[in-house]
Amino acid sequence: MAFLLLIVLPLTYLAFAFEFVAKKDWKPLLFSFASILICFPIYTWGVLQSRSSTAAIALVFIPIFASSCGLLTFAFFYARSKANLVFNTFAGLSVLGIFIIYGFGAYAGISEKRINDEKDQLLNAINEQTRWINSHSPAHQGKENEWLKQELESHKNDLSFQVAAVRSPFLEDDSLRQLAESTDNRNLLSTIVVHKKVTPITLESIFKKHGFNDKLDVSFSMNSSTPTAILDTIYSRSTFTDQWLASNLNTSKASLRKIATIKKMTTLIPLSHRNDLECISLKQMKTSLSDVKMFDADGVREETLNRVAGKIAVQCPNQ
């Protein structure tokens, strides 16, 4: 639909523009150009505020909004030429539509910038707290966990300190569990879930309380201590965790058989490095690799395919 609008709206605008040129009616044409020229920098700035790797794709769709502004400008001048209440109302709505389009682009950019500024501020605060923890930890050598647990009590409302403490190598599972029970913050919970010292029991407790949606699924999938039952639940509901589940040693055989059917190199490569796959998974993975459509200039697909074929030859000689 968006791609259709990308073609139809600019062509429609050009058709009306040529009509105004033919009539030598320059005023609507000039104002429509102005409305378009205002639209482009607003939306370009808004899109560039995003830090998403795919954000630049949105630049392609700016002509949809710009063309809409140009067409609404033409509509305004047409309605004003009729000089009656109904058309005057329509003219007012045309101007309102232009400002709504401008406002939408500006609001999106401002919102994205605010979010990025907040993330930067939090990251800077976390780095500062990390430096503080590292500089003071030598004074508590051998008792870092107890010291940090006390510090966390005095920093209950300081997210930056909590994240810095969890990212340090000093907290033990008891402190991680206590902190997880006292927070609903997704960033902090994600940091706890991927911690090397968090135990399966603590992970089960966190999943029971916070695992009702998929916000923490990637973090659970990345931790090799996550119980198999949780990983199976995650795979059954998530479409974006397969590449981490492919390398997680606790992923069940049943889930691995399904993952082997996914035709994505980001999933098949880590899966091909496992040494515990069943023959049925290996054979399905070989089929999936053969079906992957990609330009294999670096030979990655071929290398992965050969690795899987070698395992089939060794593990499944009679099948």
Image (cartoon, rainbow, N blue to C red):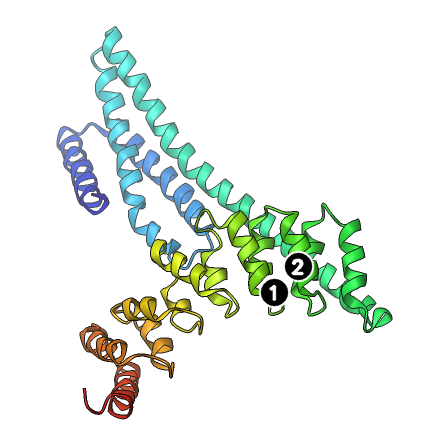
Q: Quadrant of residue 307?
A: bottom left
| Residue that carries the numbered disc 1 in the rendered image | 198
Q: State the residue at coordinates (44%, 40%).
A: 108
Q: Nearer the viewer, residue 78 or 114?
A: 114
Q: State the residue at coordinates (31%, 73%).
A: 265
Q: Amino acid at mark 2?
A: Leu
| Residue that carries the numbered disc 2 in the rendered image | 176
Where is residue 260 drawn, in percent x and y? 28, 72
Most extreme residue toward the right is 139
- Measure the C-alpha gap from mark 2 to mark 1: 7 Å
Q: Mark 2 and 1 residues: CB-CB less than 8 Å, in contact?
A: yes
Where is residue 250 drawn, in percent x and y? 44, 70
Where is residue 243 drawn, in percent x and y? 38, 68
Q: Is residue 312 left or right of residue 159?
A: left
Q: Which mark is residue 257?
A: none
Q: State the residue at coordinates (50%, 65%).
A: 226
